[in-house]
Image (cartoon, rainbow, N blue to C red):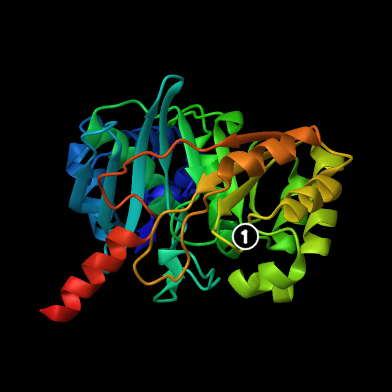
Amino acid sequence: MTDLKSQTPEEMTRTLMPMGEPAFRGKQVFTWLHRGVSSFDEMTNLPKSLREKLAETCVLTPPKAVCKQVSKLDGTIKYLWELGDGNCIESVLMQYHHGNTVCISSQVGCRMGCAFCASTIAGKVRDLSPAELLDQVIYTQKDSGLPISNIVLMGIGEPMDNLDSVLKFLELVNHPDGLNIGMRHISLSTCGVIPGIDRLADLGLQLTLSVSLHAPDGETRSKIMPVNRAYPVEDLFAACHRYFEKTGRRISFEYAMIDGVNDRDWQADLIAERVRGMPGHVNLIPLNDVVESPFKPSKRVAAFQKRLEVHGLTATVRRSLGGDIDASCGQLRRKAMEEQKGK
């Protein structure tokens, strides 16, 4: 069965040509799919005969919201989506004064093994298709009734570990006949997969690259982020400098503040030393408590921020959203998996 939603209008046109359809049908089908139709019968301006052919040869797998949590504090909405094969992923809709941002997953589970993250506890199951990435944006917008203006790929999974699908998703979500969300409104996060960073640099996309740093020294980073053993932090910073030289885009460094692990003054000094020579923004993240993790939130967030600013770095503290729901990435999926085991 053909996965139409993972195709561009031009690719859809080529898919429909053997059915004897004119070229403009590809654009029509593309537009319908990006409106969030759940069946081909909803494509009312297509001939019935074509709708029947599409139903026979193509697949539509709209996700099902099996759990929806809405924060009473700030309106943040967290979705647990069930995919066509029964696997589940998470998306989070966050409301800001500048617009609505959806955080989407790129994989079912994650194999990166970061010690403080709930997403990776059960390992990686599979990659998401471009359509499954896109559906998180479309159906979050459709269910919430709120227009999506910004996207962050920071949910479950490592985007650089599924880069082909991610790049195709970026092409689709940016398309003027679809959601038409500009690249400058999209952030892509990586825990430090250097080949992906270099590939992204060569493409010159005007998105925001976010690097999940969490420690500037190899010893600490290897303890909490196994990826550092494959791609050492010194090499990671070198890749970041290459990325800036090629794209001119400022990189955002994500930094979860962990008590007694990565919140010392000398680590702030080392960040400044390794970022020097390129514009960098450090986003300090108050750690979410994860039941299975031994790590606790740092008490030195303000002091660490001040230390970075003394070096001339821009450092902000991420505003915590959804504090009364399972806001930490992977927590809702993990809870659902545990409940399923108990049945």
The one of 213 and 247 positioned closer to us in this rendering: 213
Which residue is found at the position 80% from the left and 38% from the top?
A: 247
Which residue is found at the position 89% from the left and 40% from the top?
A: 277
Residue 233 is drawn in which quadrant?
bottom right
> What residue is shown with label 1?
191
Q: Look at the picture and state if 337 lies above or below 140.
A: below
Quadrant where the image shows the N terminus: bottom left
Which residue is found at the position 61% from the left and 64% from the top?
A: 261
Task: Work out whether residue 43 can be spotted.
Answer: no
Which residue is found at the position 48% from the left and 38% from the top?
A: 151
Q: Look at the picture and state if 163 lies above or below 70.
A: below
Amino acid beneath label 1: Cys
The one of 173 and 258 positioned closer to us in this rendering: 258
Q: Look at the picture and state if 157 lies above or below 91.
A: below
Quadrant where the image shows the C terminus: bottom left
* Whole-percent x, y for residue 207 in the image: 64, 37
